[in-house]
Image (cartoon, helix red, strand yellow):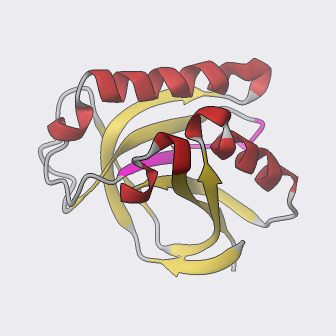
Amino acid sequence: MSQVNLSSMKIIGITVRTSNAAGASGTDIPELWNRFISEGMLTKVTNRINDTIYCVYTEYEGDYTQPYTTLLGCQVTELKDIPSGMTGIVIPSGSYEQVTVTGNLMNGIVFEAWMDIWQRPLNRTYIADFEVYDEKATNVSNAEVTIFVGVQN
């Protein structure tokens, strides 16, 4: 883990409200991914900067044990002309702990990383955390995904 300062980013995508309680997120988030891919959401995002996919966790009701919103989408130049059924958000600038995981995405490497993050004594903001799926994540069996966890300075 290393701490980085990031500029704000605008993201447009589809959302689901979920929770880590009773395994809800283990069903809801994969269903969101399936919808994003099967309905070709990537190509529907207007003002898209590139094809990198962001999985953003935001609108926390408390900490990671409370309900939150997951948004799956792309970085955009502006939050205009948001397609019907999609949502636009701003990931705020600030300090983030950066965690990079590598391996087979089908083996739960990202979820395992989150379980480790939840156990760490981080001074989290619970405003926005996110995963980045860029060209390094295209090979599912040997992917690299970067996770950014919002922390207080």
State the residue at coordinates (42%, 32%): 15
The answer to whether any part of residue 130 appears in the image is no
- Identify the image quadrant of the N terminus: bottom right
State the residue at coordinates (19%, 42%): 45
Highlighted range, magenta:
53-65
The quarter holding residue 94 reads bottom right
In the image, residue 48 lies in the stretch drawn in magenta: no
Q: Nearer the viewer, residue 31 or 94?
A: 31
As drawn, 75 above or below 3: above
The count of marks equals 0
As drawn, 25 above or below 95: above
As drawn, 33 above or below 8: above
Indicate the position of residue 74 as horizontal and vertical percent values: 31, 50
The quarter holding residue 14 reads top left
Horizontal side of 40 relative to 128 (left or right) equals left
Indicate the position of residue 39 as horizontal and vertical percent values: 25, 22
The answer to whether any part of residue 127 appears in the image is yes
The quarter holding residue 81 reads top left
Indicate the position of residue 97 as horizontal and vertical percent values: 66, 70
In the image, residue 64 lies in the stretch drawn in magenta: yes
- Identify the image quadrant of the C terminus: bottom right
Q: Nearer the viewer, residue 55 or 145?
A: 145
State the residue at coordinates (73%, 35%): 66
